[in-house]
Amino acid sequence: MLKSGARCASLAGPSRMSTRRLTTSSPLWVNERGERLILGIETSCDDSCAAIVAAPQSYSANSIASTSKLTLDGPFPTPSSHKPGPRLLTSIVKRQDHGATSGIHPLVAQHNHMASLPYAIRECLSKGNISPDGREVDAIAVTQGPGMNGCLSVGLTAAKTLAAAWGKPLIPVHHMEAHALTPFLTEAEKGGETALPLTFPFLTLLLSGGHTMLVLASGVGSYTILASTSDDSIGDAFDKAARLLAIPTDWMRNSPGASLEAFAASRSEEGEEIGAAALKPLMKHSPFAKRPEFSYSGLKSALKTRMQQLGDGEAPIATRRAIAALFQSTAIDQVIDKVRLALDPNEACDAVWSRESLSALREVRHLVVSGGVASNGELRRRLGEVWSQAEGKYLVFPPLALCVDNAAMIAHVGTLRYLDTLAGGEERQRQAFGALPRSKWSLEDL
Protein backbone atom coordinates (compact mmCIF):
# COMPACT_ATOMS: atom_id res chain seq x y z
CA MET A 1 0.00 0.00 0.00
CA LEU A 2 1.22 3.53 -0.69
CA LYS A 3 2.72 5.23 2.35
CA SER A 4 1.13 8.32 3.81
CA GLY A 5 2.14 11.38 1.82
CA ALA A 6 3.15 9.39 -1.28
CA ARG A 7 1.74 10.89 -4.46
CA CYS A 8 2.27 10.41 -8.16
CA ALA A 9 5.76 11.17 -9.35
CA SER A 10 4.30 13.30 -12.13
CA LEU A 11 2.29 15.67 -9.96
CA ALA A 12 4.75 18.50 -10.49
CA GLY A 13 3.42 18.86 -14.03
CA PRO A 14 0.23 20.61 -15.15
CA SER A 15 -3.16 19.27 -14.08
CA ARG A 16 -4.80 16.75 -16.40
CA MET A 17 -7.54 18.46 -18.35
CA SER A 18 -10.94 16.79 -18.30
CA THR A 19 -11.31 17.49 -22.04
CA ARG A 20 -8.16 15.67 -23.13
CA ARG A 21 -8.59 13.22 -25.98
CA LEU A 22 -8.08 9.55 -25.19
CA THR A 23 -5.38 7.98 -27.35
CA THR A 24 -2.78 5.26 -26.91
CA SER A 25 -0.12 7.97 -26.81
CA SER A 26 -1.81 9.92 -24.00
CA PRO A 27 0.57 10.56 -21.07
CA LEU A 28 0.01 8.26 -18.11
CA TRP A 29 0.02 9.64 -14.61
CA VAL A 30 1.85 6.94 -12.69
CA ASN A 31 2.94 6.52 -9.09
CA GLU A 32 6.51 6.47 -7.86
CA ARG A 33 6.82 2.81 -8.90
CA GLY A 34 5.81 3.54 -12.48
CA GLU A 35 2.38 1.93 -12.15
CA ARG A 36 -1.04 3.00 -13.33
CA LEU A 37 -3.88 3.04 -10.79
CA ILE A 38 -7.44 1.86 -11.45
CA LEU A 39 -10.39 2.52 -9.15
CA GLY A 40 -12.93 -0.32 -9.11
CA ILE A 41 -16.58 -0.13 -8.02
CA GLU A 42 -18.82 -3.18 -7.44
CA THR A 43 -22.54 -3.20 -6.49
CA SER A 44 -23.98 -6.19 -8.36
CA CYS A 45 -25.68 -7.71 -5.31
CA ASP A 46 -25.65 -6.55 -1.70
CA ASP A 47 -22.06 -5.54 -0.93
CA SER A 48 -20.96 -1.95 -1.60
CA CYS A 49 -17.35 -2.25 -2.72
CA ALA A 50 -14.52 0.03 -3.84
CA ALA A 51 -10.87 -0.84 -4.46
CA ILE A 52 -7.69 0.43 -6.08
CA VAL A 53 -5.35 -1.82 -8.03
CA ALA A 54 -1.93 -0.75 -9.31
CA ALA A 55 -0.31 -2.40 -12.32
CA PRO A 56 2.80 -1.91 -14.46
CA GLN A 57 2.17 0.09 -17.61
CA SER A 58 2.91 -3.01 -19.68
CA TYR A 59 0.26 -5.13 -17.93
CA SER A 60 -2.65 -5.85 -20.26
CA ALA A 61 -4.82 -8.58 -21.75
CA ASN A 62 -2.15 -9.09 -24.41
CA SER A 63 0.65 -9.40 -21.87
CA ILE A 64 -0.97 -12.25 -19.94
CA ALA A 65 -1.92 -13.96 -23.21
CA SER A 66 1.73 -13.79 -24.28
CA THR A 67 2.86 -15.22 -20.94
CA SER A 68 0.39 -18.09 -21.39
CA LYS A 69 1.83 -18.93 -24.80
CA LEU A 70 5.40 -18.89 -23.51
CA THR A 71 4.49 -21.13 -20.59
CA LEU A 72 2.64 -23.63 -22.77
CA ASP A 73 5.52 -23.74 -25.24
CA GLY A 74 8.02 -24.13 -22.37
CA PRO A 75 10.24 -23.96 -20.53
CA PHE A 76 8.23 -23.21 -17.41
CA PRO A 77 9.14 -19.84 -15.88
CA THR A 78 11.08 -19.83 -12.62
CA PRO A 79 10.19 -17.58 -9.69
CA SER A 80 13.08 -15.26 -10.57
CA SER A 81 11.79 -14.87 -14.14
CA HIS A 82 8.32 -13.66 -13.15
CA LYS A 83 7.64 -10.11 -14.27
CA PRO A 84 6.08 -7.62 -11.85
CA GLY A 85 2.33 -7.84 -11.94
CA PRO A 86 -0.68 -6.05 -10.50
CA ARG A 87 -1.07 -5.46 -6.79
CA LEU A 88 -3.97 -4.52 -4.58
CA LEU A 89 -3.53 -1.19 -2.80
CA THR A 90 -6.80 -1.08 -0.89
CA SER A 91 -10.16 -2.82 -0.90
CA ILE A 92 -13.26 -1.73 1.01
CA VAL A 93 -16.44 -3.79 1.43
CA LYS A 94 -19.56 -2.48 3.18
CA ARG A 95 -21.85 -5.38 4.04
CA GLN A 96 -25.61 -5.24 4.50
CA ASP A 97 -27.73 -6.78 7.25
CA HIS A 98 -30.66 -8.70 5.77
CA GLY A 99 -31.87 -10.22 9.01
CA ALA A 100 -35.11 -8.22 8.94
CA THR A 101 -36.05 -9.57 5.50
CA SER A 102 -34.52 -13.08 5.99
CA GLY A 103 -32.69 -12.65 2.73
CA ILE A 104 -31.68 -10.12 0.10
CA HIS A 105 -34.54 -7.85 -0.96
CA PRO A 106 -33.60 -6.06 -4.25
CA LEU A 107 -35.09 -2.67 -3.38
CA VAL A 108 -33.69 -2.70 0.16
CA ALA A 109 -30.27 -3.68 -1.20
CA GLN A 110 -30.42 -0.84 -3.73
CA HIS A 111 -31.28 1.71 -1.07
CA ASN A 112 -28.50 0.43 1.16
CA HIS A 113 -26.02 0.86 -1.71
CA MET A 114 -27.16 4.46 -2.08
CA ALA A 115 -26.31 5.02 1.57
CA SER A 116 -23.12 2.92 1.81
CA LEU A 117 -21.30 3.28 -1.52
CA PRO A 118 -20.24 6.92 -1.00
CA TYR A 119 -18.59 5.92 2.29
CA ALA A 120 -16.90 2.92 0.66
CA ILE A 121 -15.46 5.10 -2.12
CA ARG A 122 -14.35 7.82 0.29
CA GLU A 123 -12.61 5.32 2.57
CA CYS A 124 -10.99 3.60 -0.40
CA LEU A 125 -9.59 6.87 -1.79
CA SER A 126 -8.37 7.93 1.64
CA LYS A 127 -6.57 4.65 2.38
CA GLY A 128 -5.15 4.62 -1.15
CA ASN A 129 -3.81 8.16 -0.61
CA ILE A 130 -5.75 9.51 -3.58
CA SER A 131 -6.30 13.27 -3.93
CA PRO A 132 -9.88 14.64 -3.92
CA ASP A 133 -9.61 15.43 -7.62
CA GLY A 134 -8.56 11.85 -8.39
CA ARG A 135 -5.43 12.93 -10.22
CA GLU A 136 -3.59 9.73 -9.30
CA VAL A 137 -6.30 7.51 -10.80
CA ASP A 138 -5.95 6.56 -14.47
CA ALA A 139 -9.39 5.03 -15.02
CA ILE A 140 -12.53 3.85 -13.27
CA ALA A 141 -13.80 0.29 -13.72
CA VAL A 142 -17.33 -0.64 -12.67
CA THR A 143 -19.54 -3.71 -12.74
CA GLN A 144 -22.15 -3.46 -15.51
CA GLY A 145 -23.61 -6.93 -14.94
CA PRO A 146 -24.82 -9.49 -14.39
CA GLY A 147 -26.62 -8.72 -11.16
CA MET A 148 -29.65 -6.92 -9.79
CA ASN A 149 -30.57 -3.96 -11.99
CA GLY A 150 -31.26 -1.51 -9.18
CA CYS A 151 -28.02 -2.36 -7.39
CA LEU A 152 -25.97 -2.19 -10.58
CA SER A 153 -27.42 1.22 -11.39
CA VAL A 154 -26.09 2.70 -8.15
CA GLY A 155 -22.51 1.64 -8.94
CA LEU A 156 -22.75 2.66 -12.58
CA THR A 157 -24.07 6.11 -11.71
CA ALA A 158 -21.33 6.69 -9.15
CA ALA A 159 -18.61 5.54 -11.56
CA LYS A 160 -19.92 7.64 -14.45
CA THR A 161 -20.15 10.71 -12.24
CA LEU A 162 -16.57 10.33 -11.00
CA ALA A 163 -15.27 9.61 -14.51
CA ALA A 164 -17.01 12.71 -15.88
CA ALA A 165 -15.89 14.97 -13.02
CA TRP A 166 -12.28 13.72 -13.04
CA GLY A 167 -11.93 13.36 -16.80
CA LYS A 168 -11.03 9.66 -16.58
CA PRO A 169 -11.77 6.72 -18.88
CA LEU A 170 -14.71 4.54 -17.79
CA ILE A 171 -14.41 0.75 -18.13
CA PRO A 172 -17.61 -1.35 -17.73
CA VAL A 173 -16.79 -4.86 -16.47
CA HIS A 174 -18.49 -8.27 -16.54
CA HIS A 175 -18.81 -9.50 -12.94
CA MET A 176 -18.17 -13.18 -13.69
CA GLU A 177 -15.18 -12.47 -15.93
CA ALA A 178 -13.71 -10.54 -13.03
CA HIS A 179 -14.11 -13.59 -10.77
CA ALA A 180 -12.49 -15.84 -13.39
CA LEU A 181 -9.44 -13.59 -13.82
CA THR A 182 -8.86 -12.85 -10.11
CA PRO A 183 -5.93 -15.32 -9.79
CA PHE A 184 -3.86 -13.18 -12.17
CA LEU A 185 -4.08 -10.55 -9.42
CA THR A 186 -3.60 -12.86 -6.45
CA GLU A 187 -1.06 -15.49 -7.54
CA ALA A 188 1.24 -16.03 -4.57
CA GLU A 189 3.84 -18.47 -3.36
CA LYS A 190 2.54 -21.58 -1.66
CA GLY A 191 4.60 -23.63 0.73
CA GLY A 192 7.77 -21.74 -0.17
CA GLU A 193 7.61 -22.70 -3.82
CA THR A 194 5.85 -20.85 -6.61
CA ALA A 195 3.31 -23.01 -8.43
CA LEU A 196 3.08 -23.02 -12.21
CA PRO A 197 1.70 -19.59 -13.16
CA LEU A 198 -1.87 -19.52 -14.39
CA THR A 199 -2.04 -19.82 -18.16
CA PHE A 200 -4.70 -19.87 -20.86
CA PRO A 201 -6.53 -22.06 -21.54
CA PHE A 202 -7.80 -22.87 -18.07
CA LEU A 203 -11.02 -24.11 -16.52
CA THR A 204 -12.97 -22.05 -14.05
CA LEU A 205 -15.78 -23.01 -11.72
CA LEU A 206 -17.91 -19.94 -11.00
CA LEU A 207 -20.02 -20.81 -7.98
CA SER A 208 -22.14 -18.16 -6.29
CA GLY A 209 -25.64 -17.22 -5.24
CA GLY A 210 -26.49 -16.29 -8.81
CA HIS A 211 -24.35 -18.59 -10.94
CA THR A 212 -23.14 -22.16 -11.22
CA MET A 213 -20.92 -22.63 -14.27
CA LEU A 214 -17.99 -24.63 -15.55
CA VAL A 215 -16.24 -22.40 -18.08
CA LEU A 216 -13.32 -22.82 -20.45
CA ALA A 217 -11.28 -19.60 -20.50
CA SER A 218 -9.24 -19.24 -23.70
CA GLY A 219 -8.24 -15.60 -23.19
CA VAL A 220 -9.46 -12.31 -21.80
CA GLY A 221 -12.94 -11.88 -23.26
CA SER A 222 -12.96 -15.40 -24.73
CA TYR A 223 -15.03 -17.94 -22.78
CA THR A 224 -16.99 -21.10 -23.50
CA ILE A 225 -19.62 -22.28 -21.01
CA LEU A 226 -19.25 -26.05 -20.73
CA ALA A 227 -21.93 -26.56 -18.06
CA SER A 228 -24.45 -24.30 -16.39
CA THR A 229 -27.47 -24.65 -14.15
CA SER A 230 -30.87 -25.18 -15.74
CA ASP A 231 -32.62 -23.68 -12.71
CA ASP A 232 -31.14 -22.68 -9.34
CA SER A 233 -27.53 -22.02 -8.38
CA ILE A 234 -25.57 -23.91 -5.76
CA GLY A 235 -25.20 -20.74 -3.69
CA ASP A 236 -28.93 -20.14 -3.72
CA ALA A 237 -29.48 -23.77 -2.73
CA PHE A 238 -27.16 -23.37 0.28
CA ASP A 239 -28.86 -20.13 1.32
CA LYS A 240 -32.36 -21.63 1.09
CA ALA A 241 -31.25 -24.75 2.95
CA ALA A 242 -29.93 -22.62 5.81
CA ARG A 243 -33.32 -20.94 6.07
CA LEU A 244 -35.28 -24.21 5.92
CA LEU A 245 -33.05 -25.73 8.59
CA ALA A 246 -33.53 -22.67 10.82
CA ILE A 247 -29.79 -21.97 10.95
CA PRO A 248 -29.08 -18.52 12.42
CA THR A 249 -26.98 -16.18 10.26
CA ASP A 250 -25.04 -13.10 11.22
CA TRP A 251 -25.37 -11.22 7.92
CA MET A 252 -22.65 -8.73 8.83
CA ARG A 253 -20.13 -11.56 9.16
CA ASN A 254 -21.30 -14.53 7.07
CA SER A 255 -23.66 -15.59 4.34
CA PRO A 256 -26.34 -18.23 5.03
CA GLY A 257 -24.23 -20.67 3.00
CA ALA A 258 -21.26 -20.17 5.31
CA SER A 259 -23.55 -20.65 8.29
CA LEU A 260 -24.79 -23.90 6.76
CA GLU A 261 -21.22 -25.17 6.43
CA ALA A 262 -20.39 -24.35 10.06
CA PHE A 263 -23.65 -25.89 11.24
CA ALA A 264 -23.00 -29.11 9.31
CA ALA A 265 -19.43 -29.35 10.59
CA SER A 266 -20.71 -29.67 14.17
CA ARG A 267 -22.68 -32.84 13.52
CA SER A 268 -22.15 -35.87 15.78
CA GLU A 269 -22.32 -39.63 15.32
CA GLU A 270 -25.46 -39.59 17.41
CA GLY A 271 -26.92 -37.04 15.07
CA GLU A 272 -26.07 -39.17 12.06
CA GLU A 273 -28.10 -42.04 13.53
CA ILE A 274 -31.01 -39.81 14.57
CA GLY A 275 -31.15 -38.17 11.17
CA ALA A 276 -30.67 -41.32 9.09
CA ALA A 277 -34.33 -41.67 8.22
CA ALA A 278 -34.56 -37.97 7.36
CA LEU A 279 -31.62 -38.16 4.96
CA LYS A 280 -32.92 -40.79 2.55
CA PRO A 281 -35.13 -38.50 0.41
CA LEU A 282 -32.19 -36.16 -0.26
CA MET A 283 -29.89 -38.91 -1.49
CA LYS A 284 -32.02 -39.44 -4.60
CA HIS A 285 -31.36 -36.00 -6.04
CA SER A 286 -28.30 -36.11 -8.29
CA PRO A 287 -29.81 -35.01 -11.62
CA PHE A 288 -27.86 -34.93 -14.87
CA ALA A 289 -25.21 -37.33 -13.57
CA LYS A 290 -22.36 -37.64 -16.10
CA ARG A 291 -23.99 -34.93 -18.20
CA PRO A 292 -22.71 -31.33 -18.61
CA GLU A 293 -25.52 -29.60 -16.72
CA PHE A 294 -26.28 -28.57 -13.14
CA SER A 295 -29.65 -28.53 -11.38
CA TYR A 296 -30.49 -27.72 -7.77
CA SER A 297 -34.25 -27.14 -7.73
CA GLY A 298 -35.03 -30.81 -7.04
CA LEU A 299 -32.64 -30.96 -4.11
CA LYS A 300 -34.16 -27.82 -2.61
CA SER A 301 -37.69 -29.16 -3.06
CA ALA A 302 -36.77 -32.46 -1.42
CA LEU A 303 -35.36 -30.64 1.59
CA LYS A 304 -38.40 -28.39 1.87
CA THR A 305 -40.77 -31.36 1.77
CA ARG A 306 -38.75 -33.31 4.32
CA MET A 307 -38.51 -30.40 6.74
CA GLN A 308 -42.27 -29.87 6.55
CA GLN A 309 -42.72 -33.52 7.50
CA LEU A 310 -40.36 -33.01 10.44
CA GLY A 311 -42.13 -29.87 11.64
CA ASP A 312 -39.80 -27.41 9.88
CA GLY A 313 -37.42 -25.80 12.38
CA GLU A 314 -38.81 -27.90 15.26
CA ALA A 315 -36.76 -30.96 14.30
CA PRO A 316 -34.03 -31.89 16.82
CA ILE A 317 -30.79 -30.01 16.24
CA ALA A 318 -28.86 -33.27 15.82
CA THR A 319 -31.20 -34.23 12.97
CA ARG A 320 -30.90 -30.82 11.35
CA ARG A 321 -27.11 -30.93 11.52
CA ALA A 322 -27.06 -34.35 9.86
CA ILE A 323 -29.43 -33.15 7.13
CA ALA A 324 -27.30 -30.03 6.58
CA ALA A 325 -24.20 -32.17 6.10
CA LEU A 326 -25.84 -34.43 3.55
CA PHE A 327 -27.44 -31.54 1.70
CA GLN A 328 -24.05 -29.87 1.37
CA SER A 329 -22.38 -33.10 0.28
CA THR A 330 -25.07 -33.88 -2.28
CA ALA A 331 -24.86 -30.38 -3.75
CA ILE A 332 -21.08 -30.66 -4.07
CA ASP A 333 -21.45 -34.09 -5.73
CA GLN A 334 -22.70 -32.31 -8.84
CA VAL A 335 -19.66 -30.04 -8.97
CA ILE A 336 -17.28 -33.00 -8.66
CA ASP A 337 -19.20 -34.85 -11.38
CA LYS A 338 -18.77 -31.98 -13.89
CA VAL A 339 -15.06 -31.61 -13.11
CA ARG A 340 -14.60 -35.33 -13.76
CA LEU A 341 -16.31 -34.84 -17.11
CA ALA A 342 -13.82 -32.13 -18.02
CA LEU A 343 -10.97 -34.50 -17.18
CA ASP A 344 -12.51 -37.36 -19.15
CA PRO A 345 -15.28 -36.21 -21.53
CA ASN A 346 -17.91 -38.81 -22.39
CA GLU A 347 -20.37 -39.12 -25.26
CA ALA A 348 -22.76 -36.64 -23.64
CA CYS A 349 -19.97 -34.05 -23.67
CA ASP A 350 -18.94 -34.89 -27.23
CA ALA A 351 -22.49 -34.14 -28.31
CA VAL A 352 -22.53 -30.56 -26.98
CA TRP A 353 -18.90 -29.42 -26.67
CA SER A 354 -17.13 -28.23 -29.80
CA ARG A 355 -14.02 -29.91 -31.19
CA GLU A 356 -12.07 -26.78 -30.33
CA SER A 357 -13.18 -26.99 -26.69
CA LEU A 358 -12.40 -30.70 -26.45
CA SER A 359 -8.96 -30.05 -27.90
CA ALA A 360 -8.31 -27.14 -25.53
CA LEU A 361 -9.28 -29.26 -22.53
CA ARG A 362 -6.31 -31.51 -23.22
CA GLU A 363 -4.02 -28.51 -22.69
CA VAL A 364 -5.65 -27.30 -19.48
CA ARG A 365 -3.50 -27.44 -16.36
CA HIS A 366 -5.40 -25.12 -14.02
CA LEU A 367 -8.83 -25.18 -12.45
CA VAL A 368 -9.79 -21.80 -10.98
CA VAL A 369 -12.58 -21.87 -8.41
CA SER A 370 -14.17 -18.53 -7.61
CA GLY A 371 -17.40 -16.97 -6.38
CA GLY A 372 -18.77 -16.99 -2.84
CA VAL A 373 -19.20 -20.77 -2.67
CA ALA A 374 -15.47 -21.19 -3.40
CA SER A 375 -14.84 -20.44 0.27
CA ASN A 376 -16.57 -23.70 1.28
CA GLY A 377 -14.02 -25.96 2.97
CA GLU A 378 -15.73 -29.22 2.02
CA LEU A 379 -15.77 -28.18 -1.63
CA ARG A 380 -12.08 -27.31 -1.53
CA ARG A 381 -11.16 -30.63 0.06
CA ARG A 382 -13.08 -32.73 -2.43
CA LEU A 383 -11.88 -30.80 -5.47
CA GLY A 384 -8.33 -31.36 -4.25
CA GLU A 385 -8.94 -35.10 -4.41
CA VAL A 386 -10.07 -34.90 -8.04
CA TRP A 387 -7.86 -32.20 -9.52
CA SER A 388 -4.49 -33.45 -8.36
CA GLN A 389 -1.19 -31.62 -8.64
CA ALA A 390 0.47 -35.02 -8.71
CA GLU A 391 -1.13 -35.48 -12.14
CA GLY A 392 0.19 -32.13 -13.39
CA LYS A 393 -3.02 -30.28 -12.53
CA TYR A 394 -3.15 -27.14 -10.42
CA LEU A 395 -6.13 -26.09 -8.31
CA VAL A 396 -6.38 -22.33 -7.85
CA PHE A 397 -8.48 -20.61 -5.17
CA PRO A 398 -8.33 -16.84 -4.69
CA PRO A 399 -7.94 -15.67 -1.08
CA LEU A 400 -11.19 -16.00 0.84
CA ALA A 401 -11.75 -12.23 0.87
CA LEU A 402 -11.60 -12.18 -2.92
CA CYS A 403 -13.84 -15.22 -3.49
CA VAL A 404 -16.88 -13.20 -2.45
CA ASP A 405 -17.98 -10.03 -4.23
CA ASN A 406 -15.31 -7.32 -4.16
CA ALA A 407 -14.13 -4.36 -6.21
CA ALA A 408 -10.50 -5.50 -6.39
CA MET A 409 -11.38 -7.99 -9.12
CA ILE A 410 -13.27 -5.24 -11.01
CA ALA A 411 -10.32 -2.85 -10.83
CA HIS A 412 -8.05 -5.69 -11.95
CA VAL A 413 -10.05 -6.24 -15.13
CA GLY A 414 -9.81 -2.49 -15.62
CA THR A 415 -6.00 -2.77 -15.68
CA LEU A 416 -6.28 -5.51 -18.32
CA ARG A 417 -8.63 -3.51 -20.54
CA TYR A 418 -7.08 -0.07 -20.02
CA LEU A 419 -4.99 0.07 -23.19
CA ASP A 420 -7.84 -1.22 -25.34
CA THR A 421 -10.07 1.43 -23.79
CA LEU A 422 -7.64 4.18 -24.80
CA ALA A 423 -7.32 2.69 -28.27
CA GLY A 424 -11.10 2.93 -28.66
CA GLY A 425 -10.92 6.68 -28.23
CA GLU A 426 -13.93 8.92 -27.77
CA GLU A 427 -16.33 6.46 -29.41
CA ARG A 428 -15.41 3.81 -26.83
CA GLN A 429 -16.09 6.33 -24.06
CA ARG A 430 -19.46 7.33 -25.49
CA GLN A 431 -20.43 3.66 -25.38
CA ALA A 432 -19.13 3.31 -21.82
CA PHE A 433 -21.08 6.33 -20.56
CA GLY A 434 -24.17 4.92 -22.25
CA ALA A 435 -23.75 1.53 -20.55
CA LEU A 436 -26.91 0.35 -18.76
CA PRO A 437 -27.25 -2.33 -16.07
CA ARG A 438 -27.37 -5.86 -17.49
CA SER A 439 -29.07 -8.27 -15.12
CA LYS A 440 -28.54 -11.11 -17.62
CA TRP A 441 -25.25 -11.20 -19.46
CA SER A 442 -23.59 -14.35 -20.77
CA LEU A 443 -19.83 -14.68 -20.60
CA GLU A 444 -19.98 -15.89 -24.19
CA ASP A 445 -21.36 -12.50 -25.29
CA LEU A 446 -18.27 -10.48 -24.39
Image: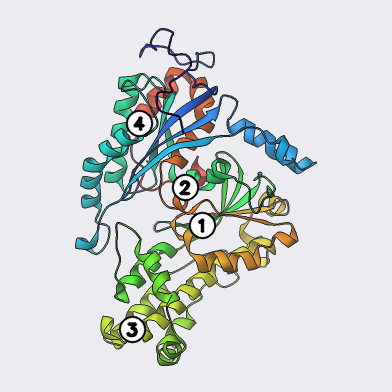
**Cα–Cα gap, marks 3 and 1:** 33 Å
Disc sitting over residue 317 in the figure: 3
Disc sitting over residue 213 in the figure: 1
Disc sitting over residue 176 in the figure: 2
Q: Secondary structure at mark 2?
A: helix
Identity, as a three-letter code, of the amino acid under mark 4? Leu
Identity, as a three-letter code, of the amino acid under mark 1? Met
* Quarter-of-image position of residue 392: bottom right
> Which residue is most to the right?
75
Q: Is residue 138 visible?
A: yes
Identity, as a three-letter code, of the amino acid under mark 3? Ile
Sequence-wise, the earlier of marks 3 and 4 is 4
Identity, as a three-letter code, of the amino acid under mark 2? Met
* Quarter-of-image position of residue 20: top left
Residue that appears at 47% across and 59% down: 375
For label 2, count other residues whose C-alpha is less than 10 Å away and answer few (under 14), some (14-19) or many (20+).
many
Mark 2 and mark 1 residues within 8 Å of each other at the beta carbon:
yes
Left or right: 172 in relation to 108: right
Q: Secondary structure at mark 3?
A: helix
What residue is pinned by disc 4?
Answer: 125
Disc sitting over residue 8 in the figure: none
Mark 4 and mark 2 residues within 8 Å of each other at the beta carbon:
no
Residue that appears at 50% across and 27% down: 418
Q: Secondary structure at mark 1?
A: strand
**Cα–Cα gap, marks 4 and 2:** 25 Å
